[in-house]
Amino acid sequence: MKTFFLILILASAMISCNKDDIANGTPDCIVEKIHDFKNTCCDNDANVKEYLFQGATVYVFDPGTCGADMTSEVADWQCTTLGYLGGITGNTTINGENFSSADLQRTIWKN
């Protein structure tokens, strides 16, 4: 019986150590994209947020504040890039519409 509890405790510890910091319900494609994004974004202030835009769920990959004129990729649930926000031109338009009309749903990931 002691062995059973020891195995149970060790298994629980191993599972909790591998906890993913990406919100539940995130499409697999976006989860994979976030894992890649973690390797290229800034060390702080980077995030991925979910929005409702033009009747669809989209994801904004904000790289953080470690550089000037960086862009934030906007992708749909299938990881199709719809465009980029910010940058040297300060772009605010995706698919011909100002992104300020997007409705923030939740933060999927942040560092």
Image: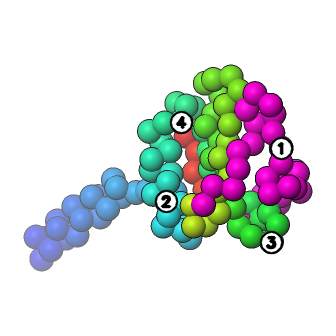
Q: Point out residue 68 in the picture as x, y percentages from the top left corner.
A: 68, 22
Q: Are marks 1 and 2 in contact (CB under 8 Å)?
A: no
Q: Earlier in the sequence, mark 3 or mark 4?
A: 4
Residue holding disc 3? 55
Q: CA distance from mark 1 to mark 4?
A: 20 Å
Residue holding disc 4? 41
Q: Are marks 4 and 2 in contact (CB under 8 Å)?
A: no
Magenta segment boundaries in residue numbering: 80-106
Quarter containing the N terminus: bottom left
Query: Label for residue 50?
Result: none
Relative vertical location of residue 33 with respect to residue 3 in this rendering, above or below: above
Q: Residues within 10 Å of mark 3 (few under 14, many from 20)?
A: few
Q: CA distance from mark 1 to mark 2?
A: 25 Å
Q: Going by the image, does 99 lie left or right of 42? A: right
Q: Earlier in the sequence, mark 1 or mark 4?
A: 4
Q: CA distance from mark 4 to mark 2?
A: 15 Å
Residue holding disc 1? 92
Q: Secondary structure at mark 4?
A: loop
